[in-house]
Structures are given as structure tokens and as C-alpha cells.
Amino acid sequence: MTNDPIIALRPIGQVKRDEGDEGLRGKALRARPARIVLDPQLTDALLGLEPGSDIVVLAYFHEADRDVLQVHPMGNRDNPLRGVFATRSPARPNPIAVTSARIERIDGNVLHVVGLDALDGTPVLDIKSYAEAFDTPYTA
């Protein structure tokens, strides 16, 4: 991997949470409201998104360990050890998160959402509208 090209991505915004998220993960974290504060220059890119619609958020888990290749899912040692590619662990070679959220409100460059699996301060890389054709498992 040392000779592979480097890909540089610039965050488009950041996750903000008014309530603490300390120690929360999974369902408990997703149940808490959050805001995605976008770079104001990208506000026009929100055209067509509406309250009640679902989005897919790609984020960068900037605090995640990038050297871990195997984990006990959900940090529970009772769960069998798995390779990170077989889990949704934030610890991975490229800690890119993919999570869905529902838009509750849009205020200018700020999306108020619920369902987001990301901590306060997490850089957001991209937002896509949820599309059943692409976001549900493939069936022949």
C-alpha cells in the first residue's frame, strides 16, 4: 500500500450535536438529533432535498484507529473476532463512514437530521439522496 496514490478529499461540512454524544454508539447515537453544517458556498447543492426525505451521508471518522484490522463487533468481546471489512467498525484503513439519516428541517446551509451515526465534529465528505435502486441490497 505504500506506493499507492494518495487521494485527497476536502470536507464539505461537519456534524454538530447540541446534546453530548459521549459514550453513545449505534442505535442510541442515531436516535439523537444532529446538524450537518455545510460550507455556505455549497448551499445551492441542497436544492431538491426536503424535510422528511432520506439521505446517505459519507463522513470521515477522523478519531478512528487506522491500524486495526480485526475487532469484536460493537466493542463487545462476547462477539467473535472479525476482520474490519466484515463489520461497521469505525476502525479501518480508511475510516469512511456511510450512514443514512432523515432530514427534519433545512435552514440555509444546515441540515437538521435524525438517524446519523457520527459524533460531534465528524467531517462530512458527501451527501447523496437515498435511492432505493442503489441503496438496498442487489437482487437478480
Image: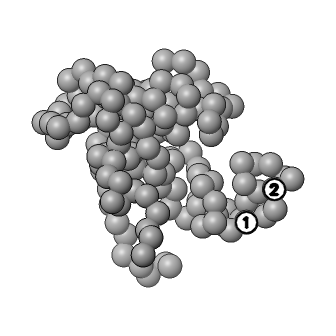
Q: Position of residue 11 (x, y in %)?
A: 33, 46
Marks 2 and 1 in Cβ contact (< 8 Å): yes
Q: What residue is at 35 percent from the left and 60 percent from the top?
A: 134
State the image quarter where residue 12 is shown: top left
Q: Position of residue 131 (x, y in %)?
A: 32, 52
Toward the bottom, the furthest residue is 3
Q: Is residue 110 above or below residue 2?
A: above
Q: Nearer the viewer, residue 5 or 42?
A: 42
Q: What residue is at 28 percent from the left and 34 percent from the top?
A: 38
State the image quarter where residue 103 is shown: top left
Q: What residue is at 36 percent from the left and 75 percent from the top?
A: 5
Toward the right, the furthest residue is 78
Q: Secondary structure at mark 2?
A: loop
Can residue 60 be seen at all in this image of the molecule?
A: no
Toward the top, the furthest residue is 18
Q: Position of residue 136 (x, y in %)?
A: 43, 58
Left or right of residue 12: residue 17? right
Q: Nearer the viewer, residue 42 or 4?
A: 42
- Residue 82: mark in rendering: 1
Q: Residues within 10 Å of mark 2 (few under 14, many from 20)?
A: few
Q: Which residue is mark 2?
A: 79
